[in-house]
Image (spheres, rainbow, N blue to C red):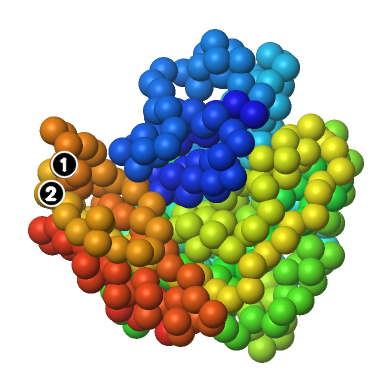
Amino acid sequence: MKILVVGSGGREHALAWALHRNGANQILVSSGNPGTAEFATNTTGDPVEIALKESVDLVVVGPEVPLVNGIADVLEEKGIPCFGPSAQCARLEGSKWFAKEIMAEAGVPTATGKVFTDHASAVDYIGEYPDKFVIKADGLAAGKGVYLPNTRKESDAIIEELFRNGSGTVVVEQRLSGREVSVLAVCNGTDAVVLPPSRDHKRVYDGDMGPNTGGMGAVCPPPDIPFDFGDDVLEKVILPVLRVMKARGTEYRGVLYAGLMITEYGYFVLEFNVRFGDPETQAVLPLVKSSLDQLFLAAARGKKLPPVEISDGASACVILASGGYPGSYSKGKEITGIDKVDSLVFQAGTTERNGSLYTAGGRVLGVTALGEDLDEALENAYRDAELIEFEGKHMRRDIGRTV
């Protein structure tokens, strides 16, 4: 098949790699990065126009923004299968309150919460116990729109900032404590198959300290998650949501990401994403032995999903970030040592000049290694991460060790 992958980050590098690894597909990437250019054709311009011009058989959308903006709907009108949900379904990520409404209708366990359209009401609701609540931007926030205030001063400042720069609505939820886990489900509108569960580490510093990032690393599967956990989430979360969306007149086709918190009272859904997680994708896909092209195409067409075969063992992805991320950071630092590693290296924030690779973003590379168990996968990933160098390189040293 001729497949167009939309996006330019580490997630898209991993998706393009997974779709190319059997050698049977021609891969185009819009717009891609130096890593995807090693085996695929990077393109520039409007993805829909590229898909039409190149007569692609399938479009796989990586980031959330094009999906929320309706790229799947446009492609469907043009007769091109798209692995990614419609704009109506993409509201599950585009609006956290819409997702809460869908979860309530579907009977999905989630934290109690309220939506606010003015600063004063949100502040009054939180009152003197900000450490009991989570404050969320209602709209898209690139994975960084969740805040955990500890003082009244912090919560007031967060709410003020969100109303000043956000969508005009803020969601305040009960704060849950426990272990986080992510489940990715490939959906055809009425049915789904779940991929191995994973765990992302959002905070920038060891010990889950510092501000949230887009993700500093991921492991698959987490060591404390039961083998059949994904099957339970399929029955209690994914399928009920698919039924509600279908009843509302739109079938969910694509990947549905459920971010969950496992508490002493059971698990609760924290959020939905309507695309593959980043960096969870870099940890999950190397363990999938089955061909993803037929799986994605069947999902996009609403057809019966083929079975998915998963490798034994575990994987670990360690993100190498620019110093200062997620705040301000420098770019243009030369990257060396990739040629020395045995692990998979997925490029995210990179650029190439005169045959050399340079940093061009906050999260620069994802080093993914496999092992017979998580300990071996982590050992391999960290060994190779140490071999890659660029000025200001920062990575967490406890990926897979904290929950």
Residue 273 in view (yes/no): yes
Pick the residue in front: 11 or 242: 11
Q: Is residue 347 left or right of residue 26?
A: left
* Nearest-to-viewer mark from 1 and 2: 1
Three-letter code for the amino acid on which mark 1 is drawn: Ser
**What number of labels is visible?**
2
The spot of residue 346 in percent (x, y) is: 38, 52
Residue depicted at 45% across the width and 76% down the height: 377
Mark sitting on residue 356: 1
Give the side of residue 234 with respect to residue 134, left or right: right
Would residue 317 be found to the left or right of residue 191 on screen? left
Quadrant where the N terminus is found in the figure = top right
Residue assigned mark 2: 334
Query: CA–CA distance between discs 1 and 2?
Result: 7 Å
- Can residue 149 be seen in this snapshot? no
Q: Is residue 343 above or below residue 37?
A: below
Closest to the observer: 101 or 208? 208
Label of residue 370 in the image? none
Q: Quadrant of residue 78?
A: top right
